[in-house]
Amino acid sequence: MADPCIAYIDVFPSSGILELGLTTVVTSHPDAIVLGVYDSGKVPDTLEHPIRSAWEQRIPVFGLRQTLCVEPSYCLLSSDPETDRALQRSIVRGAPQEASIDLNAGSEALDAMYEMQPEMLRAGLVPLQGYDPKLVALADQFAHLAKQSPVHTRAMVHLGSVLSSVMTGLQEICSAHEDYASRVAAARQRFSSPGFNKRIDSVLDQSVSFRR
């Protein structure tokens, strides 16, 4: 069996060029498509038709924030590096600030970072956090410990290139699952927290026009 084909497209402001590009990719019928969406998680309205076309052909279209799709460069270690050297030593070095997760925020804040577009969700866009759910749970643990500590701390865990892990994971998922529903369910479970998935389901449940 050939390796699954996972296509990646950066989302950018355009006058039909991006729509044409996505339509062309859908026509080639890959196993899945990943859109590098805006930092808010949104995509242009013009992509609704090709996303719906992909859904009709049972091609999953996943949305992953572009700021998570970057290579390691530099890291933000602490809000006060001069006085908080112990914390500096405890944080993984070598990854970009954009591809990081703020443990102080807790999972609720992380789940709310993505701005949902009901019309795009109905068309078939499947947002992914890109985080391992265990890492999101770690944020809750750290937030709880930080509240109990008399010393103010701030920590960020750096993730490196999220895109490479997502693309590799989707290849594994598409190899293990042949049908659309199973691929989507497996990707959501692997790359998004329960709270984030609940937000998506809540938006979809409010629309009777969503095609399950």
Image: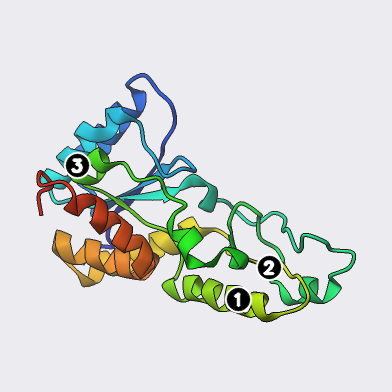
Question: Tag 2 or tag 1, which sits nearer the N-term?
Answer: 1
The circle drawn on residue 123 is: 3
- On the image, numbered disc 1 is attached to which residue? 142
Q: Quadrant of the C terminus?
A: bottom left
- At 31% from the left edge and 64% from the top edge, which residue is drawn? 188
User: Are dots 1 and 2 in contact, CB under 8 Å?
Assistant: yes
- At 40% from the left edge and 45% from the top edge, which residue is drawn? 115
Per the image, label 1 sits on a secondary structure element best described as helix
User: Are dots 1 and 3 in contact, CB under 8 Å?
Assistant: no
Per the image, label 3 sits on a secondary structure element best described as helix
Seen in the picture, residue 94 relative to 96 is either above or below; the reply is below
- On the image, numbered disc 2 is attached to which residue? 155
Question: Tag 3 or tag 1, which sits nearer the N-term?
Answer: 3
Type of amino acid under label 3: Ala
Question: Closest to the observer: 204 or 126?
Answer: 204
- At 61% from the left edge and 51% from the top edge, which residue is drawn? 98
Mark 1 vs mark 3: in front: 1
Mark 3 vs mark 2: in front: 2
- Per the model, the C-alpha gap separating discs 1 and 2 is 9 Å
